[in-house]
Amino acid sequence: MGKVMVIGCGGVASVAIHKICRNSEVFSELCIASRTVSKCDALKEKLQNTTRTRITTAQVNADNVEELTALIKKEQPEVVLNLALPYQDLTIMDACLAAGVHYIDTANYEPEDTAKFEYKWQWAYRERFEKSGLTALLGSGFDPGVTSVFSAYALKHYFDEINYIDILDCNAGDHGYPFATNFNPEINIREVSAKGSYWEDGRWVETEPMEIKRVYNFPEIGEKDMYLLHHEEIESLALNIPGIKRIRFFMTFGESYLTHLRCLENVGMTSIEPIMYEGKEIVPLQFLKAVLPDPSSLGPRTKGKTNIGCIFIGKKDGQEKKLYIYNTCDHQECYKEVGSQAVAYTTGVPAMIGAMMVMTGAWKKPGVYNMEEFDPDPFMDALNKWGLPWKISETPDLVD
Ligand code: NDP
């Protein structure tokens, strides 16, 4: 039993906090700290009479290491769960080191002025976390996160060697808007408008944005168009899965989403270069975020399912073997349970589980680690228990 501090109070945090409050045996206390404290207070108000977890709230600017360190020292949590934005990863890691607490996040660091995400900045903290006897667990969402745990699980139980991984992220949900993003629009649009890349034969192969398209027949959903994107778990899986020859990541997009995105790009609305407008500097993408529907408002409108998983091809006892491990999640079921759509749900549940793994000591060793570096079994059990049951198909369709 211990105390967790959640930083951020947006779509993903809201789901993680609902689940933390149902898991009072592990999380006896919770401090919700974010930039806009009224959102933290509203969630506390909604949940405090439904849980044995004691909830407090705080206002904090997580870009400010001193301010955050002081808050962590005052609240004294065992673990900090970072559910703010990727821009805050390093300042929150610095504050965790200064205050002596474990760290968990769901997305790797990205400098605000360059749309490029890589692990090098966070891996540079390895020695400092080791020396402090603290654990930093990186990427405890669905992808990265559960996809990384699926990879470790496949290797442990089904393969002697995995040679090919295709990570597939399908969102077949329909919210009825011509254009909206399912999580933070700024982060989402930066991700999908960047160049694609995949790992093959020990090196990165770069593609133009959305250059590689495939059609895949998803279990419980049907055929969808999907496009190759760069994704952060490729970087760590390439190092941690021995014998790997190729890793690709595909995400589904509908025609309407892509047409709107292309148009917004063409008129400069997705740019992260600041411009002057009526004497004030603004970033076009941040302005776009302000006019788009808030992802947290999509919950009641979104219908349909997600299917996220990994296709593995490798060898067992000298024979070629293939496997698809995946989860399907229903938007409306998620909304009924926690008031959020499935994209926030599939990220918030693993975030809670990652915090639980570190809090209980099931996953705890000094240093900075990616998800596939720990024993996958307790995490896989927890997924079944906490709302994201997974399935295995030994006869999946392959992606060419
Ligand atoms: P939201 O924009 O909904 O929420 C972000 C929250 O962080 C808001 O409450 C915001 O405050 C707060 N915040 C932002 N800046 C600061 C700051 N400087 N100090 C304190 N609080 C701050 O984002 P999401 O919930 O959609 O996403 C959360 C994280 O989850 C992101 O890092 C995203 O990349 C990651 N993610 C990971 C996925 C995975 O599968 N691994 C999938 C989807 C998302 P305010 O309320 O004031 O705006």
Image (cartoon, rainbow, N blue to C red):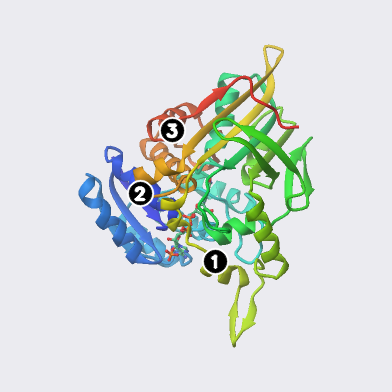
Q: Residue 95, located in which quarter of the rendered image? A: bottom left
Rendered view: 391 above or below 94? above
SS under mark 1: helix
Q: Is residue 381 above or below residue 114?
A: above
Residue 33 x, y percent position in the rendering: 36, 60
Which residue, given by chain and number where applicable, does mark 2 sit on? 17
How far across and down, in percent of the image, does residue 355 sit?
A: 41, 42
Tell me the distance, in whole angstroms, between the alpha carbons under discs 3 and 2.
16 Å
Residue 89 coordinates in the image, percent (x, y): 52, 56
Residue kind at label 1, given as amino acid type: Lys
Q: Is 393 left or right of 399, judged from the image as shown? A: left
Q: Could you tell me how far apart the alpha carbons at marks 2 and 1 are, in whole angstroms?
A: 24 Å
> Mark 2 is on which residue type?
Ile
Nearest the eye: 337 or 67: 337
Residue type marked 3: Leu
Q: CA distance from mark 3 to mark 1?
A: 32 Å
